[in-house]
């Protein structure tokens, strides 16, 4: 079964946020961290994986991404802090 990931990146604690969807979280975050993607995350130095969730349903992931992008910033911060109160980069835990 294929997995899909809804994720949030941050430039720093309480910094600029980015929300995305992917089918390969490790590859996608690697691309963000190494400026392969260009665009928003590169311009704003958004490289810390601070939150993610896994789902088997790509349509649900895309719908949730679109809803989250419209959420107030405080809701996004609360979601991050509920799972990752220190805003640590979760990427190293994925690759070890």
Image (cartoon, grey):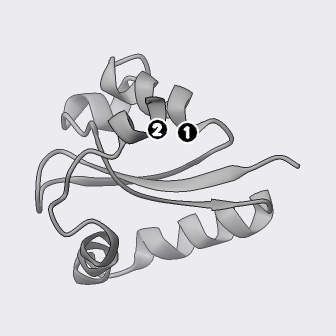
Tag shown at residue 94: 2
The image shows a total of numbered marks equal to: 2
Query: SS class of the residue under badge 2?
Result: helix
Q: Quadrant of residue 14?
A: bottom left
Tell me the crowding category of disc 2: few under 14, some 14 to 19, or many 20 or more residues within 10 angstroms, Cα based: few
Which residue lies at the image location 19% right of the left edge and 53% below the top edge?
16
**Mark 1 against mark 2, which lies toward the viewer?**
2
Q: Left or right? Give the position of 63 relative to 69.
A: right
Where, quadrant-wise, is the C terminus in this rendering? top left
Tag shown at residue 25: 1
Q: CA distance from mark 1 to mark 2?
A: 9 Å
Which residue lies at the image location 33% right of the left edge and 17% below the top edge?
34
Query: SS class of the residue under badge 1?
Result: helix
Which residue lies at the image location 27% right of the left edge and 28% below the top edge?
42
Q: Position of residue 28 (x, y in %)?
A: 51, 31
Q: Position of residue 8 (x, y in %)?
A: 39, 55
- Whether the residues at callouts 1 and 2 have beta carbons within 8 Å, the answer is yes
């Amino acid at each position: 079964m294929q997995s899909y990931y809804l994720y949030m990146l941050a430039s720093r604690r309480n910094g600029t946020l980015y929300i995305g969807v992917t089918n390969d979280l490790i590859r996608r975050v690697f691309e963000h961290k190494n400026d392969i993607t260009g665009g928003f995350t590169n311009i704003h130095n958004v490289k810390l994986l601070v939150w993610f969730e896994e789902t088997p349903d790509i349509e649900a992931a895309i719908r949730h991404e679109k809803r989250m992008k419209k959420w107030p910033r405080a809701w996004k911060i609360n979601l991050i802090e509920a799972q990752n109160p220190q805003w640590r980069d979760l990427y190293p835990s994925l690759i070890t």
